[in-house]
Amino acid sequence: MERQQRFMSERDEYQFQHQGAVELLVFNFLLILTILTIWLFKNHRFRFLHETGGAMVYGLVMGLILRYATTPTDIESGTVYDCGKLVFSPSTLLINITDQVYEYKYKREISRHNINPHQGNAILEKMTFDPEIFFNVLLPPIIFHAGYSLKKRHFFQNLGSILTYAFLGTAISCIVIGLIMYGFVKAMVYADQLKNGDFHFTDCLFFGSLMSATDPVTVLAIFHELHVDPDLYTLLFGESVLNDAVAIVLTYSISIYSPKENPNAFDAAAFFQSVGNFLGIFAGSFAMGSAYAVVTLLFPLTHLCHLTKFTKLCEFPMLETGLFFLLSWSAFLSAEAAGLTGIVAVLFCGVTQAHYTYNNLSLDSKMRTKQLFEFMNFLAENVIFCYMGLALFVFQNHIFNALFILGAFLAIFVARACNIYPLSFLLNLGRKHKIPWNFQHMMMFSGLRGAIAFALAIRNTGSQPKQMMFTTTLLLVFFTVWVFGGGTTPMLTWLQIRVGVDLDEDQKEPSSHQEANNAGKSTTKTETAWLFRMWYSFDHKYLKPILTHSGPPLTTTLPEWCGPVSRLLTSPQAYGEQLKGDDAECIVNQDELAMNYPEQATSPCSPPARPGLDQKASPQTPSKENIYEGDLGLGGYGLKLEQTPGQSQLN
Amino acid sequence: MEPGDAARLGPERVVRALPSRLLLLPLLPLLLGRGLRAAASASSSGAAAEDSSAMEELATEKEAEESHRQDSVSLLTFILLLTLTILTIWLFKHRRVRFLHETGLAMIYGLIVGVILRYGTTATSGHDKSLSCTQEDRAFSTLLVNVSGKFFEYTLKGEISPGKVNSVEQNDMLRKVTFDPEVFFNILLPPIIFHAGYSLKKRHFFRNLGSILAYAFLGTAVSCFIIGNLMYGVVKLMKIVGQLSDKFYYTDCLFFGAVISATDPVTVLAIFNELHADVDLYALLFGESVLNDAVAIVLSSSIVAYQPAGLNTHAFDAAAFFKSVGIFLGIFSGSFTMGAVTGADVTKFTKLHCFPLLETALFFLMSWSTFLLAEACGFTGVVAVLFCGITQAHYTYNNLSVESRSRTKQLFEVLHFLAENFIFSYMGLALFTFQKHVFSPVFIIGAFVAIFLGRAAHIYPLSFFLNLGRRHKIGWNFQHMMMFSGLRGAMAFALAIRDTASYARQMMFTTTLLIVFFTVWIIGGGTTPMLSWLNIRVGVEEPSEEDQNEHRWQYFRVGVDPDQDPPPNNDSFQVLQGDGPDTARGNRTKQESAWLFRLWYSFDHNYLKPILTHSGPPLTTTLPAWCGLLARCLTSPQVYENQEPLREEDSDFILTEGDLTLTYGDSTVTANGSSGSHAAPTSTEEVLERDLGMGEQKVSSRGTRLVFPLEDNA
């Protein structure tokens, strides 16, 4: 009998597990479908629907099917057990059911009004992920990849503007959305659609902050494909990346805003505490991320690898990639463990690593690492968008409120306008290279909402206002991704923005070092403030030589009295390859990575770099023979790498 | 706790049970601790109810945050462990230390952290409440609990055997680092197994297919039964001595036998690979260990499913026995077909070639879907994934673009590497953090003896029989080496940890853990001495650093280097009709593999490959004339273009461990220049020429890095 029962419970468990398999399978199929569709679209050059939009469509269809084609199965799972003895909820519950003790794990709190819809369909229940998964598993690769692929040169050129948009802009947009929504909420109370006191001003602000996280993947993908003006691209991309970080921290500090007495009145102390929290968390996460990146690159071994010419050490690109991956992840986890925001840490870890560590990796590892993160980013992004589509039907506690949704639509447009136009005006006062009107319109237009807004909204769906916010966010994401995303190409032509210009040329030329780079430097000089210029020279002269193998040798940059120290810290490679330091800044472009390789690859082959420079001085019209020669050289080098990587000094 | 007990205690603590047909449910806190104290304080301050509820909410939120933080810390622990392991491996590899493999190292670090966690953290009890409700006959997957007006949702975590209620883990940290065993099966094992299937060295594998299958199927069955019987003897002994405190049935012994039959000689194989040990030995060991795992999984699940009909549930019952055998065959063949079919039907007609990222993602998702599909249908996902990997390596791989191939390979390599090291470091950790260890010296010693006997009883007789049929005998030293390489690893661990509810299973788990430690450290460390002691050909030409190239070519001639061995004409079809030195090889293939395999080969080459991939001869030439139309529509246009032999020939040996590119290089040279089998001493000029040739090939095989400039400038 007992064994029978155990067998039964084993059966149950199998059932349980198979259901897990089924739900994952559904996602897998959705993703496969999405990939096939994207491929079709890309082949036919359809640009009106991005892959993320496609993923959402499939998710919607699947959600519809699941919702209306499956029958409620597990009726009893909705029963409520009373337990007056317990006053707080323990993390683990042991329940004795007819002599069999079961262990239950705390999942979440459910507010009273959600209990009824909760009853019923087990499949829908299974399909709903734990929201923490988004934060802990799916978002980090996306964010890291974003940080990792910030186009460095253009990014630093526009750093001031980007920071302004990201910090000031997000704050403005948060407050504007919050105020407008508060107005609408008041109107709703007036129209009897909402009980008074349900929806506080802090809730409105919360909504504002989560809605401020823009995520124009779609637009950026199209820009990238069409080679839109790099400045515009950088502005948008940089803004959206930093935006996310700001919005996350902002949301968090609003949610812990807890005045002492009346919990919803304004309290200056609590307000300043929140601001303090914001600053503290942001700075902490920033420091944590950068610290991890520095740790990564200070790895004695990576250094050793070149320093002592133990060439063998570079032979294991997989280890390097694994290490890189693990350290990036631990940046995230340690920030979380310390109570900071992991995502922000990961973002800055990515930025720093792209800047420094990347130069320390071996050639093969660079490729591998980049591909790995690209792959993870792709999967994670599509999973999230797929889930969004699914969630519209599968999520059980939607609250559709027409007025609120309308208000939200209005609010995000107004807020976006309040953010872009005044800030651009102010920035144009200081910028030499003005942001023209069509750029501003385009930026205004690209205020898409995406993964971050969704993840922030789904994180807490306990109370009624939060559920309303979640539903609204979902609809906003749908609308913006489909409509704005689809309208990008027409908008570009309508606004007469340079298309298909020079993203590539622009990359190629500067990396050919001589005139172009000088030109780039001079613009950099004039455009960015002196602070950044200081940082540049500091970075170039001291940090890079210490942390990487590129840049000028420390012995030349440091004053004489620290001679021994500098000799110790400079890697021997730095002497040989001064050239390398220059293109280090633009190595990490989206997809043009490959283009930079040849240059790097040839330079070790050719004696100290001079011939390489001459050869590359005229990259525009190379003769056929030249190409051929280059090819052979490349081949030879690649071969060497395979067999005795790092033995380049032999040549 | 007896039901009567609960009923007796019930009335005083009865709370209203909610709905319908349920009886009153007496919920009684077993572990009172903080709960009661909190209750007291709450009742005393009833006036400030609203306030306290707000406080409580804050408290719950704080607790959730705390728990989240702990989650992060526990994951961080693992990641730091892995990082440490990687760094140390780096050092070891560089110093050429071979006595400790990365997996062994991961275990050591795991052990250390386990000790720290165990003795360095304090027990934080008080979070547990135990309730008891007698009204139910089964457990729900989710539970809603009404705690003073607030509703909380609980999910089922697992069953706890009645005797263990009090030993439920009190230490939050230890509990956090203990993973759900299903994680191993659903997340960590698939990449490992898939990678194994994907990187089976195809030619050698197929040449020794008969022997490998014999070892894997017969061998595992033999070893399972021998271990099971021996352990039953040990258990009987323990009963006599009085060391056994709970039931231990014969089926449990057999289960143990099945679990422990899954060998996993990663360590040994890594050393073989590094030292370039004999290819045949490598193929035998690797093939055996891979298939072994599949057999062991299915075997153990069919033993679990063995359920005699009569009253005495542990007596022998022929019907139930045959049912188990049926289940075994059913699951195995089901998983096999599922893996093979889904593996095969990918990407024939989708030419995603311009988008390697999409291709890789598709490949990954398809492989994972295979696993999930098999699980959803009640088959064994791991087995399906294994065969999916083999099939994909055979067919799909040819359809991928060159860049995707390397991407895919690298992706799975990284995943495999991380997963494997994670499992091993978890093993180390589990020795201390797992709460329900049952150490029984007699059982452990018995198990050690049993696995050696089981291994011996499986290798020597089977080798003897196989040698009767094989032309290329398995030498004594090979047999000793195989006997020696009976390491246990990830699979045995995952199987053992899957169910640790009963006393017997807990004892098994502990024993398995110790066996894994022992074999990985001792036997893994002893591989190099053993190889030299047994006089097994090792890395006949160790490459010298300066001119590896030259040496590669010598390998090529001698044909001993495992990575390098593939002769130019490798597709069996070609091999059979090859000329020069290859004829000998071809002959051997002919005589060694049965006619069945030959038949399969030609069928594969003539029909399956053209249908499923873009290589092979066009169907129009291989199919009879009357199906011309069908043939034309199934053959992809590429096939006609790719008629040059080069493309299809390398399909079989693409997947050598680490030297993908080198293989390419060779085959290119073969195609470009002479037949490649005339391997007379080469002049330097020729070497140089080959160098260039290889370089050229690399241009296309290395993907983005080098392809781009070509396209851009030309």
Image (tube, rainbow, N blue to C red):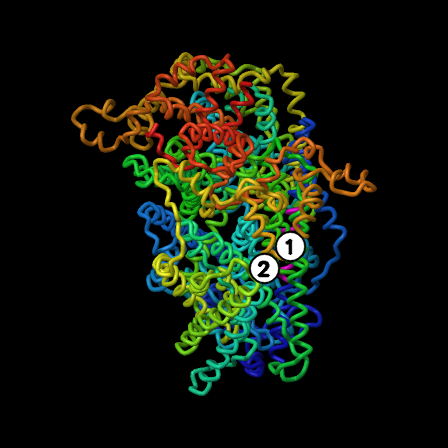
**Residue sitting nearer the eye, A439 or B36:** A439
Q: State the separation of the CA atoms marked 2 and 1.
A: 9 Å
Label 2: element kind? helix
* Badge number at residue B210: 2
**Residue under mark 2: which chain is it in?**
B
Magenta segment, prevailing SS (helix, strand or loop): helix
Range drawn in magenta: A16-29
Q: Earlier in the sequence, mark 2 or mark 1?
A: 2
Q: Where is residue B510 drawn, in percent x and y? A: 44, 70
Q: Quadrant of residue A98?
A: bottom right
Label 2 crowd bin: few (<14), some (14–19), many (20+), radius 10 Å: some
Q: Identify which residue is drawn at 55% across, 42% down.
A: B580
The outermost residue toward the left is A561
**Residue sitting nearer the eye, B583 or A448:** B583
Label 1 crowd bin: few (<14), some (14–19), many (20+), radius 10 Å: some
Q: Which residue is mark 1?
A: B597
